Amino acid sequence: MSQLSFPQMRAIIKGLINASNQSKQELGRRFAYFLGFEPGPKGPDDGVDGLIEENGLKIHFQSKLRAKKLDVDEAKKYYSDLIVHKANISIMLASIGYTKAFHERISAHSDITPVKIHLLTLEDIFYETESYTNARNDLPRLSQLQNLDWTSYQ
């Protein structure tokens, strides 16, 4: 992916987080589809934008394109979703990141350690950071995220 300038990246992120809730939910479903996940349903998605079983593993994808960092309340929901969906690997995509309280809450659950969690931001994807690279190692299709072909989605 060609490197975006900082102003370009901020403009794209701002556009995404200022979209309607319905549009952001649809973007989450499109990201999931492109990555090879079975997209979650339209409307309330029960904490999953995509789920795939690959090589005996359940891989969970959730997108939260909000205008603020995900907080402790979102961590509680995320933890619950991981348990309910029996995920082995989870990729969470947040628009701008996670609060310290989010990280503390997730790491406080000793029963979650078998789940491999990748907490990504849009910036991680645009700049192909180490966090993005680590997630891509668990889901190689992630490397194609920046090449979304919106016309192939139904």
Image (cartoon, helix red, strand yellow):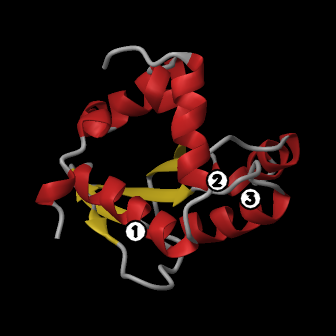
SS of the residue under disc 3: helix
Query: Which residue is at the front of the view, 29 or 91?
Result: 29
Name the disc covering residue 7, or none.
none
The spot of residue 93 in percent (x, y) is 53, 48
Disc 2 crowd rating (10 Å Cα; few below 14, some 14-19, many 20+) is some
Q: Is residue 79 placed above or below 98 in the rendered structure?
A: below
25 displayed left or right of 137: right
Name the disc covering residue 75, or none.
3
The residue drawn where x is 51% and y is 26% is: 8
Identify the amino acid type marked 3: Ala
Name the disc covering residue 112, or none.
2
Which quadrant of the rendered structure holds the C terminus?
Answer: bottom left
Identify the amino acid type marked 1: Glu
Cα separation, mark 3 vs mark 2, equals 12 Å
Query: Which residue is at the front of the view, 82 or 18?
Result: 18
Q: Is residue 3 placed above or below 144 in the rendered structure?
A: above
